[in-house]
Image: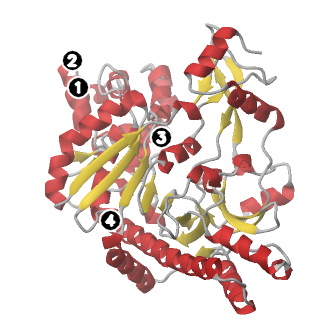
């Protein structure tokens, strides 16, 4: 199947022939669909806390963090090209004629070319765009009056100007303030100062970055670090990692034979955000905050985000203490009493919503003990969940495990058997959505770091259809970071306000009020 040069490619990529053959086998067999049995709801599976309880959990975090090492982990790989899909279409197809104008600029609404042009001065990058156009003799107001939008788009998207179509989201100007503009990278630095600083006022930040953007991130941090350290009286420690090439997966043709590039080389592709479990596994902290690079807001809206991040960390600390209590008692007992068994079952099923296999109490006591110890000896994640308002993506569900237990998981639609009307019906009953708002604990009762790679559900990956150079191919995505990569963690879902979820998927999302600073500060 592989030539001598292919074998060298595999080796150069840091992979073994056995690993690649295993990946190809996976294309042939596919992944077993997840068996969802019910959506997690406020009635069962998702915790709702009143305002006073949220405040108490935030206070608990503030009290306990003195003894904790914390980091804010931000997946920030990849270019922002998809964010500008509408504008690239406009750049390629708009020719300035009346017919073309009517085609693109008659529709109204948030995600329309008309809205982009009409509201152009509201974007944080507007002044930079004006400046790069002027440098080459273009006046933006004249171009707008003449409906000559091509230079505006070229100087925004391409290397002629700002090159936004080829930069990562983290380095784009997102938010406009009275005296400055901020990138998502900077907003995460601000957020870190607001909820992730330790008792020494140190803020640890970790960004996962594509290699081609690494210098841009590092240079930006160098440029702004002193300013934010002064503004918030903190000290930043920022580090970075790249998605490891050894987590890339081979691409195949529709018949599952290795896909070859035009020059005959094999095609390896990044295997999705699930590969970042390797990056996460190298961090040695007590509390890890996880949030995507584009899910940030300007200062006007940060209070709620800050409060709930602290509260989620407080909830994590509370439940970790409870889990450690049960783990210590059960591990240390010579004989598991009825009372202790009953208390452990009540805690797992009523507090963690871990539904044990049917008839569990009738198992031999040593088997019960071993099973409980294994469940309690796991990484812990507290995941914020927002009410489902039509956003695409995964949600919280109960999944039937092989041993008969029902556990809380974040499930994407691609992971279920969509040919099953029952599974699709359950999926569509979901009341909440996963905004990627996690706080994690990755150390055990003895303060030893878990090996996170041992808690991955290898069956939770996804096979997708792609194309390259006009040829169809199949790609393999590893179990997602907050899906299958954390499948065997202890999971707590908590309802959070929708204001805490404000991603920027398309450029015009920046025109939403949540991304427009109201106060002039």
**Marks 1 and 3, how far apart at CA:** 24 Å
Residue 136 tag number: 2
Neighbour tally class for label 4: few under 14, some 14-19, many 20 plus, Cα within 10 Å: many
Report the disc number at residue 496.
none
Of residue 498 and residue 395, the one placed in the foreground of this image is: 395
In the rendered structure, find residue 112 and report the number of the disc placed on it.
3
Q: Which residue is mark 4?
A: 195
Q: Secondary structure at mark 1?
A: helix
- Choose the circle earlier in sequence order: 1 or 4: 1
In the image, is 287 to the left or to the right of 368? Answer: left
Q: Please give the name of the residue rendered at 33% of the width and 44% of the height, measured from the top-left corner.
A: 239
Q: Is residue 258 above or below residue 295?
A: above
Q: Which mark is residue 132?
A: 1
Q: Earlier in the sequence, mark 2 or mark 3?
A: 3
Q: Are marks 1 and 2 in contact (CB under 8 Å)?
A: yes
**Real-space Cα distance between discs 4 and 3?**
36 Å
Q: Position of residue 345 (x, y in %)?
A: 71, 82
Residue 151 place in picture, x, y as percent:
33, 21
Category of crowding for the residue at label 1, using alpha-carbon neighbours closer than 10 angstroms: few (below 14), some (14–19), many (at least 20): some
């Amino acid at each position: 199947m592989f030539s001598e040069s292919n074998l060298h490619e595999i080796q150069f990529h840091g992979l073994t022939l056995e690993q690649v053959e295993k990946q190809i086998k996976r294309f042939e067999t596919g992944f077993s669909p997840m068996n969802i049995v019910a959506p997690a709801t406020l009635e069962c599976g998702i915790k709702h806390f009143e305002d006073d309880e949220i405040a108490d959990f935030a206070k608990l975090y503030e009290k306990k963090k003195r003894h904790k090492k914390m980091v804010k982990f931000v997946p920030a790989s990849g270019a922002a090209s998809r964010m500008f899909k509408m504008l690239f279409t406009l750049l390629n197809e708009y020719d300035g004629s009346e017919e073309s104008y009517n085609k693109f600029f008659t529709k109204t609404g948030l995600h329309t070319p008309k809205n982009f042009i009409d509201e152009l001065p509201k974007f944080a990058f507007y002044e930079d765009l004006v400046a790069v156009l002027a440098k080459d003799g273009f006046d933006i107001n004249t171009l707008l009056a003449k409906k000559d939008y091509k230079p505006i788009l070229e100087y925004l998207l391409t290397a002629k100007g700002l090159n936004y179509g080829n930069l990562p989201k983290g380095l784009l100007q997102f938010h406009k303030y009275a005296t400055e503009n901020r990138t998502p990278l900077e907003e995460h630095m601000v957020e870190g100062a607001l909820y992730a600083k330790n008792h020494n006022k140190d803020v640890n930040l970790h960004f996962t970055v594509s290699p081609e953007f690494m210098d841009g991130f590092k240079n930006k941090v160098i440029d702004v670090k002193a300013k934010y350290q002064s503004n918030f009286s903190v000290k930043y420690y920022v580090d970075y990692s790249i998605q490891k090439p050894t987590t890339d997966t081979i691409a195949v043709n529709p018949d599952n034979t290795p896909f070859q590039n035009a020059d005959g080389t094999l095609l390896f592709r990044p295997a999705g955000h699930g590969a970042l479990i390797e990056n996460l596994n190298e961090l040695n902290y007590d509390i890890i905050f996880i949030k995507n690079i584009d899910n940030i807001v300007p200062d006007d809206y940060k209070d709620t985000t800050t409060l709930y991040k602290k509260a989620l960390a407080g909830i994590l600390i509370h439940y970790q203490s409870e889990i450690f209590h049960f783990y210590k008692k059960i591990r240390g007992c010579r004989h598991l009493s009825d009372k202790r068994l009953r208390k452990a079952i009540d805690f797992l099923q009523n507090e963690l919503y871990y539904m044990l296999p049917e008839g569990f109490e009738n198992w031999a006591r040593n088997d019960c003990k071993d099973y409980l110890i294994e469940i309690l000896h796991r990484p812990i994640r507290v995941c914020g969940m927002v009410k489902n308002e039509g956003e695409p993506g995964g949600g919280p569900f109960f999944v039937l495990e092989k041993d008969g237990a029902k556990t809380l998981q974040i499930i994407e639609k691609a992971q279920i058997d969509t040919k099953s009307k029952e599974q699709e019906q359950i999926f569509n009953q979901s009341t909440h959505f996963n905004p990627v708002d996690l706080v994690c604990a990755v150390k055990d009762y003895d303060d030893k770091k878990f090996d996170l790679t041992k808690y991955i559900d290898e069956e939770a990956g996804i096979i997708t259809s792609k194309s390259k150079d006009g040829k169809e191919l199949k790609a393999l995505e590893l179990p997602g970071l907050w899906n299958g990569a954390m499948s065997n963690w202890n999971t707590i879902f908590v309802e959070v306000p929708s204001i805490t979820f404000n991603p920027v998927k398309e450029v015009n999302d920046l025109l939403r009020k949540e991304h427009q600073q109201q106060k002039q500060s």
